[in-house]
Amino acid sequence: MTAALSGTALPDVYGYTTADLHALPDDGRRWELIDGSLIVSPSATIDHNTIALWIANILWDSNPSNGFVIGTDQSATIDDHNEPRPDVIVAPADYLQQSPFPIEGAQLVVEVVSPTSVLRDTETKRALYARAGVPAYWIIVPDADKPTISLAELVLDEEAGQYAFATHYTTEVFETRTPWPIRVDLPQLIARRARMMRIDPQ
């Protein structure tokens, strides 16, 4: 939800700034700054975090160099009015011990969609990450009632300044070469999720 807090300075004409965000008390909640709006998300479910962890582990295992690291739920500064917290991000290794870190140089961001974040992940952040110049964006959609996990890969069209689908919400084995050769066995992950949910994936 979007928040306006007592004790927080009134926003400027473009909304709240990263300075306002960093001045918030550490209350354990997941704050983001999106287009000048302070947004707090409910605590993620174990299901959501597990899927993000699976994707992060696959990225780590396929990472061909020491030049990039994979972070989860890390604040990434885009500009004075935008500091999202992607579920997974591939960032330059120079930022290993920095938080928040600049999104410049990030090769991939991944968002796992939750019921409260559908519009934000599929529309708002899609446009935001494109403006920031992130080359690739994955949107992961877990079905709420079934073990199905869908993955969409969007690749930046630099001339148009927006993302285009390279893979449109597949549940099959997914392969890409961006940011490096990666293979995500979605049927295997779906089977693992089915066991967690204690239901038959068929």
Image (cartoon, rainbow, N blue to C red):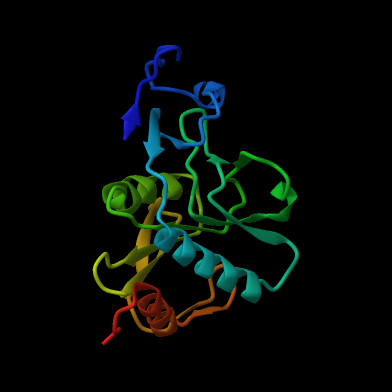
Q: Quadrant of residue 177?
A: bottom right
Image location of residue 112, percent across then percent down = 40, 59
Closer-to-camera residue (163/147) = 147
Q: Is residue 168 visible?
A: no
Closer-to-camera residue (189/100) = 189
How many marks do you count on the picture?
Answer: 0
Can you say which quadrant of the picture contains the C terminus?
Answer: bottom left
Residue with the most extreme front position: 198
Image location of residue 55, percent across then percent down = 51, 68
Image location of residue 78, percent across then percent down = 52, 38
What residue is drawn where x is 43% and y is 50%? 130
Q: Quadrant of residue 41?
A: top left
Can you say which quadrant of the picture contains the N terminus?
Answer: top left
Q: Is residue 175 left or right of residue 95?
A: left
Q: Is residue 74 left or right of residue 156?
A: right
What residue is drawn where x is 40% and y is 14%? 6
Residue 85 lies, with reference to residue 194, above or below; the image says above
Closer-to-camera residue (102/156) = 102
Image location of residue 94, percent across then percent down = 74, 50
Q: Is residue 142 left or right of residue 49?
A: left
Residue 150 lies, with reference to residue 28, above or below; the image says below
Residue with the most extreme bottom position: 202
Q: Is residue 21 visible?
A: yes
What residue is drawn where x is 62% and y is 51%? 105
